[in-house]
Image (cartoon, rainbow, N blue to C red):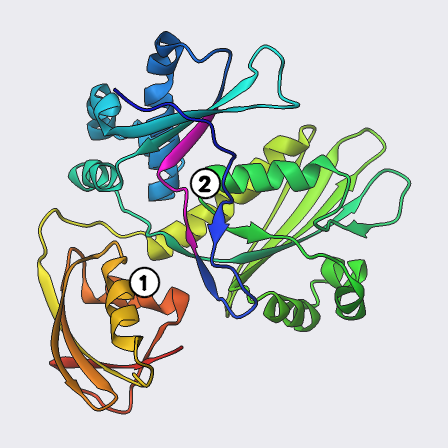
Amino acid sequence: MKKVFILTISMLLIGYSHMTYAVRVSLLYQATLPVSSQLASERSQLISQGLSQVLIKVSGDAQVMSNKAIQSSMGSAEQLMQEFSYTSASGNDSAKPYWLHMDFDPEGVNRLLRNAGVPVWAQNRPLILVIITYEAQGQQPDIISTESPTPILYWLKQEAELKGLPVIFPVMDVEDMNHLSAQDSINGALTHLTEVEKRYGCDALLIGRVIQDPTKKYITQWKFVQGNDQLDWNRDGNLLQEILQGAVNQVTAKLASHYAVVMTNQAHHKLVLNVSGMTESDDVMQLMDYLKQLTLITDVQLLKVTGSDVMLSISLRGSKQSFMESVSIEKKLTLDETTPDETVLHFQWNH
């Protein structure tokens, strides 16, 4: 029997600091749905919906439920649920006064996606700074901050959480205001905006402009920037929540196409790594723990330690290229290209 207990909703992100360039999204395998009761009958009816929510987050694919292999496996959704709990949904629809939280088995979910040939996007994901200027009818443009009294903040963060996309908004304190203005955002002044991005230790920028015209229609312009890669699009409509959902979907699809990889149930590749810069007493343990939590890796073996260098063997479900892209996100390992070696990959460990 599953244990029922009450807990508060956890934060989506853990381990965030100004020096972080990616975060480990902690609730990828948890689904949260509003419910009218704590009855088992209602919960049973929602397990498949909860698993669908998780599959979308883990794959980064909003259309994953159209996969026939996934559809045929939904009958086993209850077997993948490990735990559930309820919290009070204060301020929510009075007809649904509770949140149902369902935790699903990570390995079981990953296996389901692998068997269906669907790419899996690991938990380490780029942290995105969202800079949106909002021009309400007859008012001056204003940058949406963490304290802005607008549903834009809530809606976009809600959609990002549903997609497993880590986002933050500027606090717009004195330091932000010295480097960032609404006009900078409107003009797409990337030099200024990327300076703000560095302050928050983010890996990418989502820049948006939302204008409400006299007919209450919304005109929006968007730019997503990650390094030298940019994506631009416009979208107009009467429902702002749908427009924001579309913006999150655009960014999620863009990132998932780069970082999500098709994996096999068996390890098909082995790599040998030589990692330099192991100067602290617990560096070797931290390195091995870091590698073991990467979704692609099935096994890590310590081969030898020589001074501040460590040699390891890793087994992969994916390709060497997929591994390189995975470690590039968090920047814990930097490839040393000055020591080319066909049999050993040389990295520098970054504290």
| Rendered view: 77 above or below 281 | above
Seen from the viewer's position, the closer of residues 13 and 226 is 13
* Nearer to me, 135 or 58: 58
Relative height, residue 142 to residue 40 (above, below): below
Three-letter residue code for mark 1: Ser
Q: Residue 56: x percent and y percent? A: 37, 36
Q: Position of residue 273 (x, y in %)?
A: 18, 77
Q: Does the magenta stretch include residue 267?
A: no
Residue 326 numbered tag: 1
For the stretch drawn in magenta, what is the main secondary structure? Answer: strand
Q: In which quarter of the image is residue 67?
A: top left
Using the rendered view, name the quadrant where residue 186 is placed. Answer: bottom right
Q: Residue 92: x, y in percent?
A: 62, 21
Residue tagged 2: 163
Q: Look at the image and give the residue range highlighted in magenta.
A: 24-33
- Callout 1 secondary element: helix
Say whether residue 63 is visible: no
Q: What element carries label 2?
A: loop
**Quadrant of image for the N terminus:** top left
Q: How crowded is mark 2: few (under 14 residues within 10 Å), some or many (20 or more)?
A: many
Cα–Cα span, label 2 and label 1: 18 Å
Amino acid type shown at disc 2: Lys
| Left or right of residue 161, residue 119 in this image | left
Sequence-earlier tag: 2 or 1:
2
At x 66%, y 23%, the residue is: 91
